[in-house]
Amino acid sequence: MGVYNCEKYLQQALGSLYAQTYRDFKIIICDDGSSDATYDVAAREAAAHSNIVLIRNQKNMGLNYTLNRCLEYADTEYCARMDGDDISMPSRFKTEVAFLDEHPQYAIVSAPMKYFDDGGVFRTGKGGGEPQPKDFPKGTPFCHAPCMVRTDAYKAVGGYGVSDKLLRVEDYHLWIKMYAKGYKGYMLEEPLYMMRDDRNAAHRRSFKARVNEARVKAIAIKTFRLPVWNYIYCLKPIILGLMPSGIYSRLRQRKNG
C-alpha cells in the first residue's frame, strides 16, 4: 500500500484486510510524505499488528516510486495491491491466491471493482478473461488496485517505471513490460474490491496525465508491433482532456448511471 493523505479512510481500508478469509499475509505500507495524520494512523496500526511493515518517504515522490519501495520488502510468493482509501472484500485474497495456485500459466490476476461514495455503490465494473496484446491500446487491461501478481514477475521487470511520463499510468506500463517478458494475466468476473470514487467528478485527471496515457498506448503498439491504425486509440485521452467540462461531466454521469 502506497498511502498519501488518507487519514480519514486508512483504518477502514486496513480493517478490510484484517477481515480477509485468507489469513497468511503481511501488509507493507509506505507513506508518501503525507501532510495530514496518515502516517500516525498507520503507525498505530503497525504497533497493534505484527504483520505490518511501515516505511516512509521523506517527501512526496509519487505512487510509482512509493510502490517500488514497498517491493523492496516483499519476500512472499505473491504481492497484492491496495489503495489506502478503498475496501477489499473478505474473499479477495482467498480467491486470488487460489487462482494463481491453480493456474501457474498466469502471473497477474485482478478483478472488477465496485465504485462507491458516501451515497453507496453507484457503478460496478466488468471483467473476465485473458487480455491479449491487441487489447492494450484500448486501455489498461487490468484493474490495478485489486490485482495480485507473482513477486518474481515484479522483480523480472524491475518494478514500476519511475519517470514523470508514467505518473498515473504506472500500472498500464507495468503490464506492457510483463507481457513483453512473456507473462500473462487474467481478469476474474466477480468483483472483489470497492474503489472510493466521486460519481460527479469531472476532469479529475490532469491534461499531463492524459498525455502520459496516450504515450503509454503508443508504447504498447510499438512493443507488440500492432497495426498502425491502433494509434487512433492514442487520441482518446487527449480528446477527453480538451473536452469542455460540462460535456465531460454529462458523459461521466451517464456512464455512472
Image: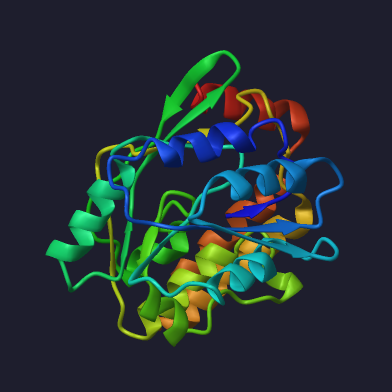
13, above or below 93, in the image: above
118, above or below 89, in the image: above
User: Which residue extends farthest top?
Assistant: 119
Pick the front one: 175 or 219: 175
Pick the front one: 183 or 247: 183
Query: Left of 42 or right of it: where is 189?
Result: left
Query: Left of 24 or right of it: where is 8?
Result: right
Residue at x 12% of width, y 63% of height: 102
Pick the front one: 165 or 137: 165
Query: Left of 235 or right of it: where is 241?
Result: right
Q: Position of residue 174 (x, y in %)?
A: 50, 72
Query: Left of 215 or right of it: where is 97?
Result: left
Instruction: Name the colour scheme.
Output: rainbow
Pick the front one: 28 or 162: 28
Residue 227 visible in the current orientation: no
Q: Position of residue 188 (x, y in %)?
A: 25, 48
Q: Position of residue 83 (x, y in %)?
A: 57, 47
Residue at x 72% of width, y 71% of height: 165
Residue 8 visible in the current orientation: yes
Quarter holding residue 54: bottom right
190, above or below 249, in the image: below
Is the N terminus in the top left, top right, bottom left or bottom right quadrant?
A: bottom right
